[in-house]
Image (spheres, rainbow, N blue to C red):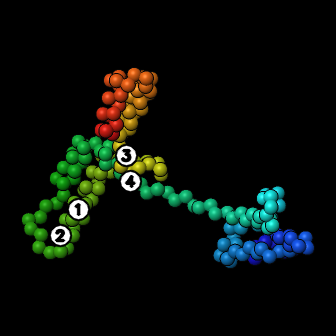
Amino acid sequence: MILPPAIPTYQVPASGIWTRPDNVFLSEEATHALVSCDVTPEEMVNGADHIPIATVLNLRLLQSEPPRRRNFRLTEWETFSEKLAKGLEDMPTTQEITSSLQLNKAVGDITKTIQKAIEAAVPISKPCPFSKKWWTSKLSVMKKKINRLSARAYKFRAVTDHDVHTELRKERAIY
């Protein structure tokens, strides 16, 4: 029980005596998060018979570092192709793969070569935690264009047959 003892929380209407039928419990595992627990008579609503109990817990979450990802949309494809071609040329070639060990080694070598090319040509993205994965820079340009057209259409709102209204409708359909 986390509400300190001898604190009344209820006034019996018939006798006017203060009592404490309200108890606040917290599991043993969560007691480390308890900041305070007390009654707040100043927040008592008119006509209420129980005094509000304010319990404050420190539930701050640890911020995890977002995983580092590559932004393949901004890949420098010429650099990628050059690094990949050079890496594949430098790989030892065998006539024929006859065992699973040779196959695993060849797959590992190819994977390492591709990873080196990716590291050289694909930048690391720094996404905002609230950003949408499907949002592109092309959509940003289209959104700005629609915003400008909307502002112009608002200026000509009294002229219903103005060209800007048709253009805005067409751009919104594309967007």
For marks 4 and 1, the one nearer the N-term is 4
- For disc 4, the marked residue is 69
- For disc 1, the marked residue is 109
Q: Is residue 166 above or below residue 66?
A: above
Q: Quadrant of the N terminus?
A: bottom right
Residue mark closest to the camera, 3 vs 2: 3
- Mark 1: amino acid: Asp
Instruction: In this rendered view, identify the residue nearer to me: 148 or 131.
Output: 148
- For disc 2, the marked residue is 103
For marks 3 and 1, the one nearer the N-term is 1
Residue sitting at x 21%, y 68%: 105
Q: Secondary structure at mark 3?
A: loop
Q: Is residue 20 left or right of residue 91?
A: right
- For disc 3, the marked residue is 135
Q: Assess disc 2: are there few (<14), some (14-19) or many (≥20) residues with their C-alpha within 10 Å of its C-alpha.
A: few
For marks 3 and 2, the one nearer the N-term is 2
Instruction: In this rendered view, identify the residue nearer to me: 17 or 69.
Output: 17
- Mark 2: amino acid: Leu
For marks 4 and 2, the one nearer the N-term is 4
Residues under numbered marks 3 and 2 in contact, where contact means CB atoms less than 8 Å apart: no
